[in-house]
Amino acid sequence: YGFEKERLSGFDSMYLTSIGVEWKEAYLKISQYVAAHNITLAFSPGSAQLADINQIVLDVVSKSSLLFVNKEEGEKILQ
């Protein structure tokens, strides 16, 4: 998935959810962009991210102002 930061100018918030199996690079770029531009991030991890909770997922969670998960998913992220 491509991440065209030029298309994001003027936005002050972003909603991020599952984007399929090739998500890691896009999530990394989005995390960096959000941090660099003081963007409010809302995040709803998908099954691919919940199956592979790694530093990228944890970084996105830490930069999120809103996190949409159920109780079991939240517990898994906190492990």
Image: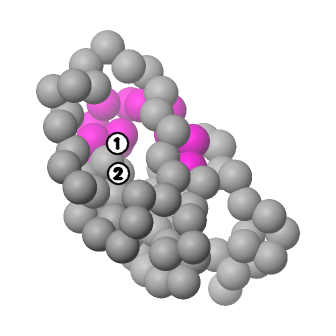
Residue placed at 40% from the left, 66% from the top?
20
- x%, y% of residue 36? 27, 38
Tell me the quarter of the image containing the N terminus: bottom left
- Badge 1, how many Cα within 10 Å: few under 14, some, many 20+? some
Q: CA distance from mark 2 to mark 1?
A: 6 Å
- x%, y% of residue 46? 56, 65
Residue placed at 84% from the left, 69% from the top?
71
Q: Can residue 62 be seen here?
A: no
- x%, y% of residue 32? 27, 49
**Span shown in magenta:** 32-43
Report the mark closest to the observer, 2 or 1. 2
Tell me the quarter of the image containing the C terminus: bottom right
Q: Amino acid at mark 2?
A: Ser
Residue placed at 19% from the left, 34% from the top?
5
Image colouring = one colour
State yes or no: residue 51 in magenta.
Answer: no
Proximity of marks 2 and 1: CB atoms separated by less than 8 Å: yes
Residue beneath disc 2: 31
Label number found at residue 35 = 1
On the picture, is 79 further left or further right than 26? right
* Relative vertical location of residue 71 with respect to residue 9 in this rendering, above or below: below
Q: Secondary structure at mark 1?
A: helix
Q: Can residue 42 be seen here?
A: yes
| Foreground of the two, 23 or 42 | 23
* Relative vertical location of residue 4 with respect to residue 70 in this rendering, above or below: above
Q: How many marks?
A: 2
* Relative vertical location of residue 28 with respect to residue 5 in this rendering, above or below: below
Residue placed at 56% from the left, 50% from the top?
43
- Badge 2, how many Cα within 10 Å: few under 14, some, many 20+? many
